[in-house]
Image (spheres, helix red, strand yellow):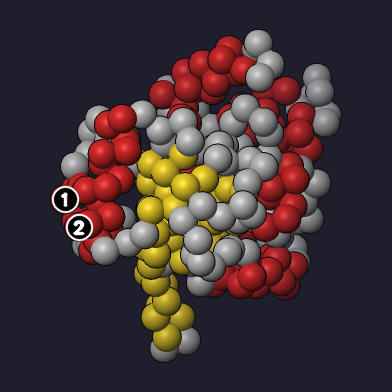
């Protein structure tokens, strides 16, 4: 791995810890000096507020985003995951978090066999099945979305959304991408929910995370899926 990778991660952690939205920094502070800055962080995206149909078309592309869990050691995969910090959570905390009542939204990461970077490189977490209509925004970098409660169309379109393949292709080697989803969505008389369907365990997981995954698997009745 590039020797600068730890530095990139440290700077990213400092910014996130301070509650800084890197996307806004880029557009507000660097746009005049570096016009390509927004393209680097946000990618080339249409103006969703002017053409909502584009947003809906890309949102629907997430219907086929993810792999079915057919193996505990899949050689090829695409998953939407939520990493868990085992130093601040117990398995019972996770069950309570999933069953709610809780926040309206949650932040996920889209991973594949070639890019399995998770939030702060955590080694264990949940794999979710997510209806495409529940996906509200995405970015190839963390944009501190987990604090959002105003999940309206204007917010979603102001951030933008990638197709699954575009998000993976634009995600960098040293950071994690972010996908903001509604946990429960009531629309047109129908309710759609995100559902945990597995527990991921990375090869880099430590002993505590391995033990945690076994406890959580037994408690929730979910398979442990080993990823890179």
Task: Give the class, few, some or many, for how many residues have Cα within 10 Å of label 1's Cα (few <14, many ≥20).
Answer: few
Q: Residue 119: where, in percent of width, then height?
A: 47, 36
Q: Secondary structure at mark 2?
A: helix
In terms of depth relative to the viewer, which is nearer, 1 or 12? 1
- Which mark is drawn over residue 219? 2
Q: In the rendered view, tell whether residue 123 sits above or below residue 108.
A: above
In terms of depth relative to the viewer, which is nearer, 213 or 171? 213
- The reply to whether dot 2 and dot 1 touch (C-beta < 8 Å) is yes
Q: Quadrant of the N terminus?
A: top right
State left or right for residue 21 relative to residue 59. Answer: left
State left or right for residue 159 relative to residue 130. Answer: right
In terms of depth relative to the viewer, which is nearer, 178 or 159? 178
Q: Residue at x 32, y 36 (%)?
A: 209
Residue 61, image quadrant: bottom right
Please name the residue that numbered disc 1 is placed on: 92
State left or right for residue 93 relative to residue 3. Answer: left
Residue 63, image quadrant: bottom right
Q: In the rendered view, tell whether residue 218 sits above or below residue 206.
A: below
Q: Residue at x 39, y 80 (%)?
A: 191
Q: Earlier in the sequence, mark 2 or mark 1?
A: 1
Q: Residue 70: where, in percent of width, then height?
A: 51, 66
Q: Is residue 120 visible?
A: yes
Q: Residue at x 42, y 44 (%)?
A: 201
Q: Secondary structure at mark 1?
A: helix
Q: Residue 151: where, in percent of width, then height?
A: 46, 59
Q: In the rendered view, tell whether residue 186 sits above or below residue 110.
A: below
Q: In the rendered view, tell whether residue 139 sits above or below residue 141.
A: below
């Amino acid at each position: 791995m590039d020797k600068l990778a730890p530095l990139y991660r440290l700077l990213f952690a400092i910014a996130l810890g301070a509650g800084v939205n890197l996307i806004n920094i880029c557009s507000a502070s660097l746009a005049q000096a570096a016009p390509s800055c927004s393209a680097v962080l946000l990618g080339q995206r249409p103006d969703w507020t002017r053409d909502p149909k584009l947003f809906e078309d890309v949102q629907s592309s997430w219907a086929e985003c993810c792999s079915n869990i057919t193996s505990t050691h899949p050689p090829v995969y695409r998953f939407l995951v939520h990493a868990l910090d085992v130093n601040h959570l117990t398995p019972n905390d996770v069950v309570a978090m999933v069953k709610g009542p809780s926040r309206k939204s949650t932040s996920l990461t889209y991973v594949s066999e070639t890019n399995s970077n998770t939030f702060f490189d955590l080694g264990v977490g949940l794999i979710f099945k997510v209806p495409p209509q529940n996906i509200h925004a995405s970015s190839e970098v963390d944009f501190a979305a987990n604090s959002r409660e105003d999940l309206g169309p204007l917010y979603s379109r102001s951030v933008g959304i990638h197709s699954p393949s575009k998000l993976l292709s634009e995600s960098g080697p040293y950071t994690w991408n972010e996908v903001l989803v509604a946990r429960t969505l009531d629309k047109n008389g129908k309710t759609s929910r995100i559902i945990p369907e597995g527990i991921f365990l990375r090869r880099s997981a430590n002993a505590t995370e391995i033990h945690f995954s076994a406890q959580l698997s037994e408690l929730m009745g979910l398979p442990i899926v080993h990823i890179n």
